[in-house]
Amino acid sequence: MERLEDRPKLEVRWLFGEEELDFRIPQVFLCLGKRGSGKSAFLETVASRYLDEGGKVFDLFGARDGEGLAWLRSPHVKEGKRAVLLHGDLVKVRSEHETLPASRFALSDLDRGDLFISASPLYETPDAEFAAVNRLLDVLWGRRRWTVPVFVIVREAANLIYSRLKLRGNQQQAKAEMLYLMRESRHAGLGLGVDTLRFTAIDIDVRSLADWLILKNLGLFPLPDDLEWVYKYINPPAFRGLIPRHFVILSSGGGLGLGVFGLPSWHKTEREDILWETGVEVEYPGGGQPDPVKVVEKALWSLPPGSEPKQVAEWIREHAGIELSPEAVETYAKKLGYRLQISLTDEGGKFQIKKALVGPSPPPQG
């Protein structure tokens, strides 16, 4: 399949035991590393490859800031991959993309999209999210036959164990169910991408079920005893020096390699309000949420006609204390009837592209 230039690359140099990462079949990736080491970005890169090969992706258990929603600005969605937002029963979600209560999801709904996003801000409470994700996994687990793989991103393995614990009330049974899910997932056509912060949270039973073990920057934590042999080939300080793009990979067949991947351009940054950035509006029970359309509208009324999206974003940052990208401003301005006028200007012998928002006249003040 042709690789598009805007896709994050993923390359491995094998030290021994060279093997191929095949994104046409369900596989289990277990990614370990400290916070900020690029674990989520790596799993997004793997999921990107599954999408390119015709598979489907479920992004579950993201951080409370809704990092999974960043997929909505990925090249996959821009090029026609269909996104479905899964949400809680008591939450109203408005988006240009299809929405569906997670409690109503059925296997037949796989035909409705390519990328299914279950993000924390789309649920009324953490407990509602845990219950919903448990159900989603149970439904996917029930596939008896399949034609394309479904790659499921579980950000932080402890969330998966905790969600089963909430359901079963027994930690040993919760862990046993996670092991069973990992062991039998390929029979349901499920690939899994799981990340975790510490080896102590994931013991050898879980690690042994991974097709690929991805080691990122481990910080202060050493490798567990059963993996100390890796130090014969890669010295301990090297793990603490890994930048987010770099990783060490171990295969279930005994291979060891060094890898590099391109950080996804759409990945959420720490200070972003991803709901605003992607144009997703959420209404929770018992209270309303800020209306980004009205904020942009107020900014446009306050600025001279024909202002650039960048100027509008700067006004909002200064007067409303909200970080909003120029691209997000364009999205909301279009909802207000504005259009983007693009012109080419010559400033000091250099051609510059100028964007201006042109639309209805502001209402009379008074």
Image (spheres, rainbow, N blue to C red):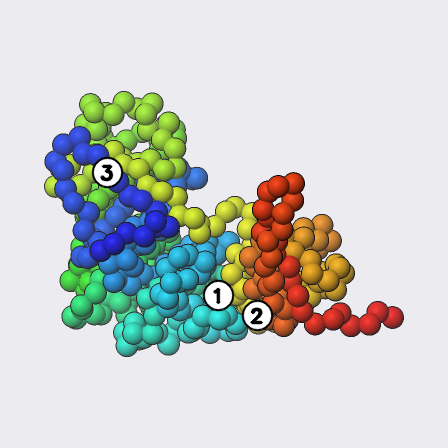
Tell me if 37 is positioned left or right of 22 in this view. Answer: right
Secondary structure category for the residue under label 1:
loop
The amino acid beneath tag 2 is Glu
Spot occupied by residue 257 in the image (x, y as percentages of width and height): 21, 34
Residue indicated by mark 1: 123
Q: Residue 183 placed where, x, y %?
A: 18, 55
Lateral position of residue 344 relative to residue 76, left or right:
right
Residue at label 2?
283
- Determine if residue 61 is in view: yes
Q: Is the Cβ of the residue at disc 2 closer than 8 Å to that at disc 3?
A: no
Identify the residue shown where x is 14% and y is 32%: 16
**Tag 1: amino acid:** Tyr
- Quadrant assignment for the N terminus: bottom left
Q: Earlier in the sequence, mark 2 or mark 3?
A: 3
Answer above or below: position of 155 versus 333: above
Q: Is residue 66 above or below residue 13?
A: below
| Label 3 sits on residue | 12
Mark in the foreground, 1 or 2: 2
Estimate the x, y position of residue 300 in percent, counting from the top left: 71, 62
Label 2 to label 3: alpha-carbon separation? 44 Å
Measuring 47% from the left and 50% from the top, which residue is drawn there? 268
Whether residue 132 sits left or right of residue 251 in the image: it is: right
